[in-house]
């Protein structure tokens, strides 16, 4: 069973100006780490959705989306627009969970999308903190393949670290 990301890919550029230098607005993640066979009937579907506001904090910027009722999606659908150096695009999810130091500005644009499936190859690592080892170096473990890496980014092959 192939696993991956069900996403709605932009079919046109957005007109909002990026705040940070990193990022290329590309898609709305409908569902992450799902079985392709469950969503096969949606792949290729084209639809329109409306951008309703621009939201950002000191690290990241996103556009919140109003989705059609017949398109299934996770909570708080959005497009990550830009982010500062050292921040991962997935941090845009936090904009909708915490309201400290965020700015929300009205924004409206009708956008065209096409649903596609991005299949994970070997593994699209999603790193979770896994405690610290000798020397106080942060360790991470992938929630999918259980490979581990150290704070310097070195991916360890073979048997993963014991989860803490």
Image: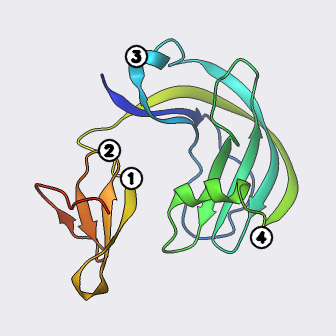
Residue 161: give x, y in percent of width and height.
21, 62
Mark 1 to mark 2 CA distance (whole Å): 7 Å
The mark nearer the N terminus, 4 or 2, is 4
Residue 81: x %, y % from top left: 64, 56
Q: Tell me the CA gap for discs 4 and 1.
A: 25 Å
Q: Earlier in the sequence, mark 2 or mark 3?
A: 3
157, 79: nearer the viewer:
157
Disc 3 or disc 4, which is closer to the eye? 4
Please name the residue shown 59% across and 66% down the image. Answer: 83
Inter-mark Cα distance, 2 to 3: 18 Å
Q: Are marks 4 and 2 in contact (CB under 8 Å)?
A: no
**Seen in the image, is 28 located left or right of residue 44?**
right
Q: Residue furthest left?
A: 158
Which label was assigned to residue 37?
Answer: 3
Q: Nearer the viewer, residue 19 or 67?
A: 67
Gap in angstroms between the C-alphas marked 3 and 4: 39 Å
Q: For residue 134, what is the image quadrant? A: bottom left
Q: Are marks 4 and 1 in contact (CB under 8 Å)?
A: no
Q: Quadrant of the C terminus?
A: bottom left
- Which of marks 2 and 1 precedes in the sequence? 1
Label 3 element class = helix
Q: Which mark is residue 31?
A: none
In the rendered image, residue 147, in percent from the top left (x then y), is placed at: 23, 55
The answer to which of 16 and 2 lies nearer the viewer is 2
> Callout 4: few (<14), some (14-19), or many (20+) C-alpha neighbours within 10 Å?
few
Secondary structure beneath dot 4 equals loop
Q: Which element type, helix, strand or loop, lies under badge 2?
A: loop
Is residue 8 shown left or right of residue 69?
left
Q: Which residue lies most toward the top here?
A: 41
What residue is disc 1 on?
126
């Amino acid at each position: 069973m192939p696993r991956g990301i069900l996403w709605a890919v932009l079919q046109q550029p957005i007109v909002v100006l990026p705040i940070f230098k990193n990022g290329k607005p590309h898609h709305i993640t409908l569902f992450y780490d799902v079985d392709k066979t469950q969503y096969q009937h949606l792949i290729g579907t084209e639809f329109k959705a409306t951008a309703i506001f621009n939201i950002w904090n000191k690290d990241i910027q996103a556009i919140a989306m109003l989705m059609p009722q017949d398109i299934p999606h996770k909570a708080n659908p959005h497009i990550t627009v830009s982010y500062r150096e050292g921040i991962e695009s997935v941090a845009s999810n936090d904009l909708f969970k915490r309201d400290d130091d965020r700015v929300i500005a009205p924004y409206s644009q009708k956008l065209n999308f096409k649903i596609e499936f991005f299949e994970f190859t070997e593994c699209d690592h999603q790193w979770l903190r896994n405690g610290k080892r000798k020397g106080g170096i942060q360790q991470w473990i992938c929630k999918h393949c259980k490979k581990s890496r150290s704070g310097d980014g070195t991916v360890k092959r073979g048997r993963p670290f014991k989860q803490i």
